[in-house]
Amino acid sequence: MFARSSNRLFNVINTSYIPSRGARAWVRKPLGSPMAKSKLFRIPQKKILPADEKAEIKRLYDNYFHHMKSLRQYFFEQSLKQAESGEVAQMKHKLEDEEHMKLMEENCLENEKTAKLREERLKVQAEKTRASVLASLIKKEEESRLHEIQIEAFLEQQKATPFIQTENIEKAIEEALANPFDPNFAIDLDGYVYRGRETSIGKIPEEARERMSSI
């Protein structure tokens, strides 16, 4: 029983396997079978066609190729014409035009809003720039005025400073010799100041000594 079922399954799989007068015969070699041993090393001879026959075959093939190419191009152009001239295409173009007009209107409104915002921003920026420039000019003017005041004060100070004139130079020399000035001084640990290079500490009484004032 198992052999019969396996044979039926094998017959279903191999459709080329048919019975013939009670015997099983193959119409063709089953798939997966190796090459026959009798044909293993046989090299088939290539058919040699005459030159005129080969040229005729090539001509027929070229004609077929060009004809089919022309037909495909013709059908393609006809389909494009029908697609462009059909009601669906016209409706589609109409919807696209309406959508384009709507988008253009929205774009114009958005451009107007952007232009207004830009004008306001530029106006505020111009005011800020004007205020900063004015403040810098005022500051520069004040600085120049203070500089002029300082120059005038310096000139007045220089004018007020006593200078030795040419005609008074001998008198100034005599006064300097009569009243010598010694810038040297010394300070002891108690804070007393002794002015002059040759000043003796013992010759100055304690009540006459100069005490250094604390700041």
Image (cartoon, helix red, strand yellow):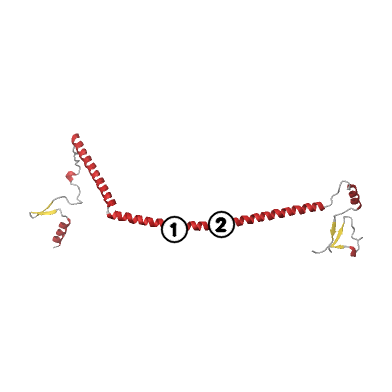
Query: Where, by quadrant of the figure, is residue 201 drawn?
Result: bottom right
Q: Position of residue 46 (x, y in %)?
A: 19, 39
* Residue 58 spot, x, y in % from top left: 21, 38
The N terminus lies in which quarter of the figure? Answer: bottom left
- Residues at marks 2 and 1, CA–CA distance in whole angstroms: 24 Å
Residue 185, position in %: x, y?
A: 85, 57
18 with respect to 109 (left or right): left
Judging depth in this view, the residue of 54 and 7 nearest the camera is 54
Give the foreground label among 2 and 1.
Answer: 1
How crowded pointer 2 is (Cα within 10 Å; few <14, some 14-19, many 20+) is rated as few
Element under disc 1: helix
The residue type indicated by label 1 comes to Leu
Name the side, left or right, on which 191 lies relative to 60.
Answer: right
> As drawn, which residue projects farthest toward the left?
21
Residue under label 1: 109
* Amino acid type at mark 2: Gln
Residue 185 falls left or right of residue 44: right
> From this viewpoint, which residue is outermost toward the bottom?
207
Kind of element beneath mark 2: helix
Nearer to me, 95 or 191: 95
Residue 138 — which label?
A: none
The residue carrying mark 2 is 125
From the viewer's side, name the closer residue of 198 and 13: 198
Residue, far top: 51
Please tell me which residue is depicted at 21% across the width and 38% down the height of the picture.
Answer: 59
Q: Residue at x 90, y 65 (%)?
A: 207
Which of the marked residues, 2 or 1, is nearer the chain's N terminus?
1
